[in-house]
Image: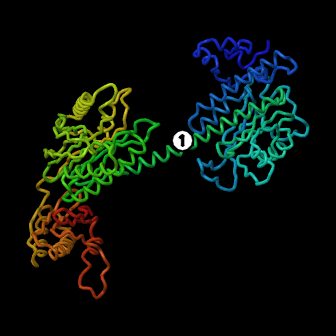
Amino acid sequence: MTEHPTSHEGRQPVAARSQERTRPRQEASAAAVPPPVPSVPAPATAQATAPSSVPPQDPVGAARREGDRLRFVGAATRRIARGIDLDEIVLGLCRATVPTFSDAILVYLRDPLPVGDERPVAPFVLRLRRTDRLRLTDEDGESLGTPGIQLPESEAGRASLLDPQADVMPAAQLCEVASGGALSEVLRGVRPVFGDSAAARAALPELLGGEMGLPGGRRAILAPLRGRRRVIGAAVFLRRPDRPAFEPNDLLVAAQLATHTALGIDKAVLYGREAYIADELQRTMLPEGLPQPTGVRLASRYLPAAETARVGGDWYDAIPLPGSRVALVVGDVMGHSMTSAAIMGQLRTTAQTLAGLDLPPQEVLHHLDEQAQRLGTDRMATCLYAVYDPVSHRITIANAGHPPPILLHLGGRAEVLRVPPGAPIGVGGVDFEAVELDAPAGATLLLYTDGLVESRLRDVWTGIEQLRERLAATAQLTGPDHSPPLEALCDDVLDVLGPGDRDDDIALLAARFDGIAPSDVAYWFLEPEDAAPGRARRLARRALSRWGLEELSDSVELLISEVVTNAVRYAERPVTLRLLRTDVLRCEVGDDSPQLPRQRRARDTDEGGRGLFLVNRLARRWGATRLSTGKVVWFEISTRP
């Protein structure tokens, strides 16, 4: 009895289909799932498994063959539909058709592939995306040749597309479809055609290359791949000369395969574009890198909710502030969609702007709450805003419905900080409170979103306690006198997530407080008078001598003189001068004038206007920040040669 693809795949003959309708749906579905196609079957088996292997004059065989063909199309289209990205869909087409339907297949796709309503670029170019074929082994015959296959004399000496000894199928990798040409006409017609038709005989050499050998008779089918709006490629199905030729009904099979493949490719291309947009949106919404403020080290992590939902409303930020301070922010907008990410971006931008005004943390949250209400009535978010001062070793925290931070001390003790919980941003009509706490040197502050501690398997407070215990256990490994490495600590924190705990995206910001020792800080008040620049130079010279930085005296005195002179010119209250020694020497000059200095090119006849030019040339970095009480102009000079 002749075997069919369905006979060794556990399928039922056509005669039993009436019984299938009365069986439970689960049993019928299981019977329709095809097993994997064998990769290297014997030539006889390949011939037997082809849907067209039964002679057409046999009525019973014809009915069985038609049933096999329908089941094959169903199994093949399901296999194609399982693919998500473009490569998976094309691979599904190849694996579903070789060797059951054809001995070889070539898939050409438009390069580049148009997306959605995009107009395809000119010229119309097809690129070979993938090939697949039945490969023979020594067990199939005395040699790797194809037993019993004799190519026509006209094809002798030409490279065959079915040559089993070739490592790569000899087909053109790139084809430019000429407008009005034979290939263009076949693709425009959409329907598959046999290789021996007049249209295909003219189109196939244009697609595959004129020197490629093709099997004779109806052993090739050229099927255009048409998506929702346009032709996006072509597939060529090939059979060996020792195998029965394609039948007219096989054109319908090829059309079904081509249609499902093209629609799947359209879907995959659109999905790929959306995933790219989502990745770009999330990347631009989050900081590209963290700053390196004085007295604190930072590390961060972000994990999306899932591979299929790469955008979300969680964000973190670290913003340098005047006086060597730094603002630490973490927030969470409800949901993890494009809308959530867009709202998150607006709130993050607002927080950066408010931080630039040097507002207290509770005022920043108040203005964020107003901004969220302007965005919509249902725009809810939680946020925690903290300001760390490395000179005073203090941190000020305000909370808007966010999980409390955890402080890991140098000795290994981890504590959940008691901060006022506050209402989420967007509620409106509520006040936010700030609390000031000690931030000892060597301690680590961990800010996070609820995705790290809350899931369907545990409530938020259970997760916070597990996180605290994990931090304490990690700190014990490094000993009481050393803090755990910051990057490794972040990785270890994420290990607290167990199976089923990833219900939401996660943002994590860790800050290691190094602080600035009092001996490395010098601070003075200067009256706004003409003698202030000279006094500032003398004070700076003494501080540099005390720190052993006399070699910097000339440059520092010159720059301090220029900046203090500019401050005295506009100030009405005492001017502040502060020097900070860390890995660089930082000088900060503050006054009560809100007008920021601006560098400009002085003319030869101008008596002034060259101060900031000198600062820009001699300083490592410099800047100016507006405060609620005036401004601060600062510059940094490297302490290393």
Who's the residue at 21% across and 67% down the image? 633
Q: Residue type at mark 1?
A: Tyr
Tell me: residue 17, above or below residue 130.
above
Tell me: residue 582, above or below residue 538.
above
Tell me: residue 145, above or below residue 309.
above
Q: In this view, does 267 lie to the left or right of 633?
A: right
Tell me: residue 211, above or below residue 42.
below
Q: Where's residue 549, x and y in %? A: 17, 64
Q: Where's residue 559, x and y in %? A: 21, 72
Q: In this view, does 273 lie to the left or right of 451?
A: right
Q: Quadrant of residue 68?
A: top right
Q: In this view, does 453 lie to the left or right of 11?
A: left
Q: Which quadrant would the C terminus be assigned to in this image?
A: bottom left
Q: Quadrant of residue 42?
A: top right
Who's the residue at 18% across and 35% down the image? 415
Identify the image's colour scheme: rainbow, by chain, secondary structure or one colour: rainbow
Q: Where's residue 264, x and y in %? A: 61, 37
Q: Where's residue 78, x and y in %? A: 62, 28
Q: How many labels does the image show?
A: 1
Residue at the disc numbered 1? 271
Residue farthest toward the bottom in the current orientation of the protein:
605
Visible residue check, residue 397: no
Look at the numbered disc 1 and give the secondary structure of its residue. helix
Task: Answer few, some or many: residues within 10 Å of disc 1's Cα (few below 14, many 20 plus, some between 14 and 19).
Answer: some
User: In front: 379, or 350?
Assistant: 379
Q: Which quadrant would the N terminus be assigned to in this image?
A: top right
Q: In which quarter of the image is residue 199?
A: top right
Q: Is residue 210 left or right of residue 455?
A: right
Visible residue check, residue 72: yes
User: In front: 5, or 340?
Assistant: 340
